[in-house]
Structure formats: structure tokens, C-alpha cells
Amino acid sequence: MSSPSRRDPDQDAEVIVVGAGPAGSTAATYLARAGIDVLLLEKTTFPRDKVCGDGLTPRGVKQLIDLGIDISPEAGWARSRGLRILTGDLTLELDWPELSSYPPYGLARTRHDFDDLLARTAQKAGARLYEQTAVTGAITDERTGRVIGVRAKTGPEKTPVSYRAPLVLACDGVSARLALSVGIDKHDKRPMGVAVRRYYKSPRHDDPFIEGHLELWDRSDPRDPKLLPGYGWAFPLGDGTVNVGLGILSTSKAFRSTDYRALLRSWLDGTPEEWGYREENAVGKIGGAGLPMGFNRTPHYRDGLLLLGDAGGMVSPFNGEGIQSAMESAQLAAECVVQALARPEGPSRERALEAYPLALKEEMGGYYRLGNLFAKAIGNPKVMRAATKYGLRINSLLPLVYKGLSGCYDARGGDGVDRLIAAASRVTPSA
Ligand SMILES: Cc1cc2nc3c(=O)[nH]c(=O)nc-3n(C[C@H](O)[C@H](O)[C@H](O)COP(=O)(O)OP(=O)(O)OC[C@H]3O[C@@H](n4cnc5c(N)ncnc54)[C@H](O)[C@@H]3O)c2cc1C
């Protein structure tokens, strides 16, 4: 159980968690519940906005259930029964699948509320949250190179401080400042994405389906319009607004030259007027950020530093979801750290920590390798066109496409489709 005596007098915590997004707050919660003395450092102050689509598929919902969070509509969650896919003249409404691993519904909630709720959950569990504390880099042991703490600037005066702990979790999102400070760079061959979004007041705010629009056209050369590898979404929030946005993969030629904000506007101008996605109904500005995908930053464990969530490039190359994988990585990391801290420093503890990247590989590695190939393939506009035109019109393929793209399948057991996705994930070679 928790005991300050377990912490060395020259250390500030048993574990330092950097960043209180979904990865950091989830990890801090599990660690604190296991009796670990956790310091959770966050550069902003809650509640705060975070650019995101605010949507969770059933796989993400499972993470909230595991944490014991009240996910009832009364507690402020918008619930979805499935996904509506729109492409050309085709509209499909697909309920979330019945599975043993995940519930048959999705959720949405603004990150303004969601991240605040998760951070408070970590605090309630016993983690010490220091807000307005921006970590600037790792402190390493000169002799061994091991990460033994972090430097930060804290408070309105940005006062330099340092904190020490035997283990540090990098949960600082796509900027990955902590990993970079110890030379863990991203792999440029893995896909990246860019996504932009805006809130609109809309009568569709309580639509029971979340929506995916598969046709995003780059018309920069009017003689040669190209179908972009990505999709537009509309995630109803049940509070009078809808989160509407789009995400594009780096695998297309248009990736660097596209003006994403202009693309969002031109796509929405083409949607029916009564949906309300027009300037006069917009709430706030268009926000955008990068999506680090398919394990584009590894190793996920080295010398006392674990990478979680976006910091470890864990956004799904299939659908751009990153909350659920951030929380899954947190659950796995916490399990390994709890075991590690129960062992003496040295090889035995290292063995427990090495289990973290292995567990990640087992949970997501094969599926992401498959996703990286998928991202590469649809970067070719002809393949993307064929996929949207024919892939969704073959009824027998639908469950495969739906479960595969959403990541909602039973990795163990399940039906034939689940087994096929699980097998394909296992046999896909490294990209
Ligand atoms: C437009 C857009 C739409 C998206 N839509 C969805 C979606 O609908 N569903 C989905 O699942 N995913 C979506 N994603 C991806 C998702 O937002 C991320 O994958 C997810 O937030 C990753 O969680 P994280 O905890 O790893 O990182 P983050 O959520 O980025 O959290 C990192 C935290 O660390 C803090 N931090 C950063 N640097 C420091 C520092 N130096 N010191 C201290 N603290 C620091 C930040 O303030 C932040 O609180 C979307 C992304 C974008 C850009």
C-alpha cells in the first residue's frame, strides 16, 4: 500500500506522469489506486479546451467503464447507437456491433469537460496534480543515461523547478517534448495525419448516429480533382452543438499543400443548409493538430521513460482515434509499473518494465501494422476511389470494413469476421 517511506528522501514521487490528457490522467488514476505516490504535471489549467473530435467508439467507452466513470446521459454524455456512413449517393446506418469485449454504444463529450473529469478522477484516486507546470525536458543520470526526473517551469512566473522519481511516464501528446529531450525521434516512414474541427449549433445535435463522410475532394486543380485519403465527421454532443471536422492522412501527395481550414469550409458549404454547418452557427474558431499514427515513435520504453498515447504515436491509422489507445496504453503501462516498483532496482525491475512495449505490441501492434499498410494504399486516389465506390456496396464485406476500421472486434473468440481481422493483424509483416 501507499507509504511515503517507499519513496527515497531525494525523490519527489515514485512515478512522475507528464501531461494530464487521457493517457496521463488514466495512468495516474490506476497507479494511485494501486497505492503508488504519483506526481501528475500538466502545463495548462483545467478546465481547458483541446482540439479533438470528442468522439469515442465502443472500444474507448470500455476504458471509461474500466475506470468506473459514470457514463450515463444524465452525467453529460451523448450516446451513439452506431455510425452513419455517407459516400456519393450511398448512405448506410450501422449499429455498433454486439461483442464480448466492448459495449454496443459510443460516447461523445467535449474535451473541455472530458479531460477535466479524468484529471479530477486521478486526483480523487490520490495523484498529486500540479497544473500550470510545463515540463521542458528529462533529467538523466550522467553515468547511466537513465531518466531520473524532469525539469519544468511552474506557475505564472514560470519558475524553474525539477522533480525526481525512478520512473517517468511521457503523456505529453503529439509534441512529445519529453521523448525528444532524450533523443527518441519519430519514424518518418509511418503515417501521420492532420485533423481540423469546429463546433456548430445544429438541430442534429441529438442524432443517435455519429457520421462519417468518406468523400473529401481536393479541387486545387479543377481539371483534376482528387479524392483525399481521409474522412469528414459529425459527432453530435447533445448540448445543442455538433463537432464537425475532417482528417487527412500524410500518405497522399496533396498532404502538404492542402489548406485544411479551407477544405473544411468548402465541404460544409456543400452540406444541406438545414444541418446548420454555416458560419453564422459556428461556435469558436477552427482548430487543428497533427495525428501521430501507427506507433510512429518508439521505443515505448527505455531507461526509466515510458511513452504513452500520442507521445508514442498511438493514433489509429484506420480511423484517427487516439483517446482510446491513449487510455489502453495507460492501463498497460500502469500494470507494468506497479509490478516493476514492487521489485528491487536492477534487472528484475527492468524485466517488468520491458513487458510494457511487449503488451502494447500484443494489443495494438499487429492491427496498427495492418493500418499502416491501409493508410499507404488509400494514399493513392485511385485506390481510395475504388474503396469508397465499391467497398461499401458489397454487403458481405460490410461487417469486415466496419469492424476493421473502427477497431471494434473481439481479438479473442468472436465471429468469423473478428477472427479474420485478428488473424490478419497477427500475420501482417512490419511496414
Ligand atoms: C482535430 C482532431 C480530432 C480528433 N478526434 C478524435 C476523436 O474523435 N476521437 C479520438 O479518440 N481521438 C481523436 N483525436 C486524437 C486525440 O485527440 C488524441 O489522440 C488524444 O488526445 C491523445 O491523448 P494523450 O493523452 O496521449 O495526449 P493529449 O490529449 O494531447 O494530452 C497531452 C497533455 O499533456 C499536456 N502537455 C503537453 N506538453 C506538456 C509539457 N511539456 N509539460 C506538461 N504538460 C504537457 C497537454 O496540455 C495535455 O493536457 C483527434 C485529434 C485531432 C487533432
Image (cartoon, helix red, strand yellow):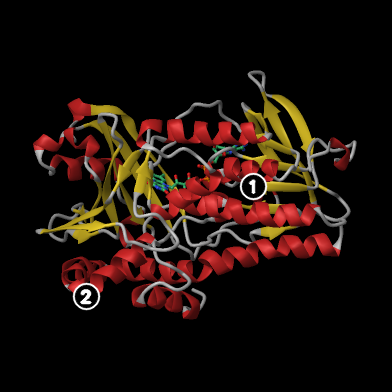
Q: Is mark 1 within 8 Å of ligand 1?
A: no
Mark 2: secondary structure: helix
Q: Residue placed at 60% from the left, 52% from the top?
A: 331
Quadrant in the picture for residue 32: top right
Label 1 Cα neighbours within 10 Å, binned few <14 / some 14-19 / many ≥20: many
Task: Give the residue number, with chain letter if any, for mark 1.
Answer: 170
Image label count: 2
Q: Residue placed at 18% from the left, 53% from the top?
A: 219
Image position, residue 141 (x, y; %): 84, 49
Residue 317 vs 238, above or below: the answer is below
Q: Residue placed at 65% from the left, 54% from the top?
A: 333
Please state, as top left, top right, bottom left or bottom right, where the N terminus lies in the image: top right
Answer yes or no: is residue 296 visible. yes
Amino acid bearing label 1: Ala
Image position, residue 4 (x, y; %): 84, 36
Mark 1: secondary structure: strand
Task: Give the residue number, with chain letter if any, for mark 2.
Answer: 396
Amino acid bearing label 2: Ser
Image position, residue 208 (x, y; %): 24, 44
Quadrant in the picture for residue 263: top left
Answer yes or no: is residue 53 visible. no
Residue 119 is marked as none
In the image, 374 versus 183, the foreground residue is 374
Of circles 1 and 2, the one toward us is: 2
Residue 28 vs 179, above or below: the answer is above
In the image, 416 versus 160, the foreground residue is 416
Image position, residue 146 (x, y; %): 80, 53
Q: Is residue 426 toward the left or the right of residue 334 in the image? A: left
